[in-house]
Every structure is written in structure tokens, then in C-alpha cells.
Image (cartoon, rainbow, N blue to C red):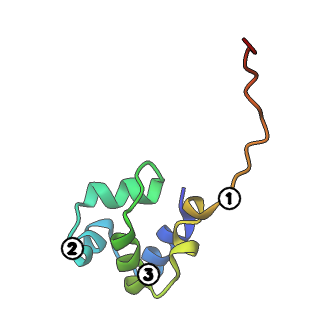
Amino acid sequence: MRDRLTDERHVRNWSQKTVAEYLYISEVYVRKLEKGTRNPGRELMLKFEKLYSVSAKELFPDLFEVKFDTKCIKGNSA
């Protein structure tokens, strides 16, 4: 869950519907963004940054995580 995203909305006492209206997106989409089941595009991230005056990295930290995959796939040498 994207806690900072929901916290910023709660601090302002806004409903998901209010945020959706400000950003011209659906209320369902706001809910999915907050739960982390959907990811915003770059343009929408910038709109959230402007709406809340908080960086996208803080609002959507899961999208900016750097993960290193240390597992190697073992292949057959033919």
C-alpha cells in the first residue's frame, strides 16, 4: 500500500472521489493507485506531485525501488 499517498489525502480531509475529480480520473482508479494494484503513468505522477506538493518518489516509493536479481538461470550447455 502506498501510505504516503493515502496520508496526504487524509491530511486534507479529501475523499477518493474528490481526488479523482481534481485529477480527472475515476474514483476506482484512485483506489487502485492507493492500494498499489495499478501504477500511474509519468504524467499522472506529476499531477499527484503538484496536487500534494510531494515528490513522486515519496508518493510511489515502490516504483522507484532498485532491485538486484542475484539469481542466475542455469542453462544447459549444448
| Separation of residues labelled 3 and 2 (CA atoms) | 16 Å
Residue at the (38%, 53%) spot, across then down = 32
9 or 25, which is in the foreground? 25
Calculate the distance from the C-alpha at mark 2 to the C-alpha at mark 1. 33 Å
**Residue 66 rendering spot, x and y as whole percentages:** 68, 58
- The kind of residue tagged 2 is Glu
Q: Mark 1 or mark 3, which has the lower sequence index?
A: 3
Tag 2 residue:
21
3 vs 2, front mark: 3
Inspect the image, locate mark 3, and give the three-letter code of the amino acid beneath it. Glu
Of mark 2 and mark 1, the one earlier in the sequence is 2
Q: What's the residue type where badge 1 is placed? A: Val
**How dense is the environment of label 3, judged by Cα within 10 Å: few (below 14), some, or many (20 and up)?**
some
Q: Which residue is mark 1?
A: 66
x, y (%) of residue 15?
33, 70
Q: Residues within 10 Å of mark 1 (few under 14, many from 20)?
A: few
